[in-house]
Image (spheres, grey):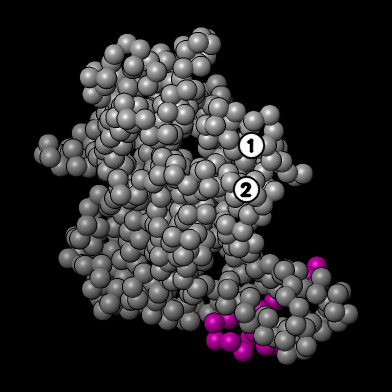
Amino acid sequence: MNIKKYIIKKIRKILNTINIKKKYNYKICNNNKFSDYQINGIIEISKKEKIKINLLFKIIKKKLIKKKIFDKIKIINPGFINIFLNKQYIENIINIISKKKNFNIKSKKKKKILIDYSSPNVVKQMHIGNLRSTILGDCISNILNFLGNKIIKINHIGDWGTQFGIIITWIKKFKLKNKINNLKIIEKIYKLSYKKYKNNKKFAKKSRKNVVYLQKNKKDIIKIWKKIVKITTKENQKIYNYLNINLKIKNNMGESFYNNMLFKIIKDLLKKKIAIKNKKSVIIFSKKNFPLIIQKKDKAFLYSTTDIASIKYRYKKFKINKIIYFTDYRQKEYFKLIFYICKKAKYIPKNFSIKNYYFGLILNKKGKPIKSRKGNNLTIKKIIKLIYKKSKKLITKKNIYNKQKINRITKKITISAIKYMELSKNRKTNYIFDIKKILCLNSNTGPYIQYSYTRIISILRKNKTNTTKSIKNNKFYISSELEYKISKKILDFEETIIYTSKKCKPHIICKYLYTISSLFSKYYEKENISNIKNKKIKKSKLKLISIIAKILRIGLSILGIPILYNI
């Protein structure tokens, strides 16, 4: 149950009874030091509606106190309403919702949403710069799917364009076609060829010609291109599979997919006078944004042309309600312009929901972005190996001797450490990549949440209790202040999931999972459930930790993180 939403609805109804129809932005704060919930913003309503503040307070208090969910309501100067929940009502709600599938959390308006994420460039190994889009996009697709929306996942891989002209020119020049049999070799060739492209005008000219030949489907060029794409996507899929990323090769719909549509797009935008010819190039000018080239002098297309074509195609083909992109903040203005063009050209309706949820950069220890073309980049494969090695050391200290078990647990902790490192950070901020901090078992990390869940499972096993049966058959009673705090946090779960989905900021749910895990840790230290003789009290406490386990299991699943053990 979303208590905050419930309070907002009730206040709206109360205001309607005194003919206040306007929707005001009064705030409901929970976990207040002085109460369970606090309402502020009522003074603004009284001023604008010309109602005496004391009278308005009395009306709200009188109507709210009639609801069984509230125990006490206090008016506090300079204009706050403090609300205290009824403990028995909280118990009843928890006993009811805990039995429901996923705590009965679901979206009222289910949508068909297309999510564009990950999008690594072909010819290169997936590197640290690909982590954010990949992990954020996958987590948000999990949340939106959990709420009942239909999700279409697209991996818009960079399998077209200038980089292919560069690498193919090098491969043809040195007759390396039969030597490109793994991604490391392809990446090495690309780095050498890119350097040549930057410093040799003749080589650069040939590379640009080969881009045009690629776009015109020249046979020998296409053959090399297909081989490079196949090798790269196969390697990328291994990374996705290892990290529990729900992307498959069938989700790949790269830049090349839209190649046959690009001439029509150029023609249409020129016809609609959205684009103009300028010194043999085709350009779109906008008062709000920078000029955008959609076709070069040599007739080659750009990323922008492909992005416009992709939006037009996706809207028409999939009949979607919304499109979501995950890109870094440097592309923020670029996508604003792309969306503006698509709406102006009527490829999507003006009111169509299309969002770019941009994110910050992953920085090195000097606070600078890690670049991929300079040869010193940290690949995701290398990150996995580094964290796996450190995780294994951590596991072997826990007196586990079965090799298979060690490897299985180590893999799960590695996945958790990498994903949670990303998801626990505010999407909009930059952060420094630090391996030392992400395996800590007493702070806000993935392994800490996994460990909390494992502790609960250990207690339940010791007491021969199954989480599902305990939740279904036992009755929970609040018997301490700490249990009351945990109960309120349980009621916040729905609000946390909904708010995370709206803002597309998974750090909100990470913070929640860390808080409830920390509360359980205090509970674990205080309560020795196994030694309780009173069956009623014992069953109540077992049910409470079973509910926490259910929350952690759902939360970790949404984050794409595996649990270490099950019951």
Tag 2 secondary structure: helix
Q: Position of residue 201 (x, y in %)?
A: 53, 11
Above/below status of 21 relative to 127: below
Residue 350 lies in quadrant: bottom right
Q: Position of residue 138 (x, y in %)?
A: 40, 50
Residue type of the residue flagged with mark 2: Leu
Above/below status of 518 relative to 230: below
Return the residue at label 1.
282
Residue at 69% in and 76% down: 74
Which of the two residues, 145 or 476, is positioned nearer the viewer here?
Answer: 145
Whether residue 388 is visible: no
- Specify whether 126 is left or right of 19: left
Q: Label 2 neighbourhood size at 10 Å, few (<14), some (14-19), many (20+)?
A: many
Structural distance between the alpha carbons of marks 2 and 1: 10 Å
User: Are the residues flagged by discs 2 and 1 in contact, CB closer than 8 Å?
Assistant: yes
Which segment did they paint magenta?
61-79
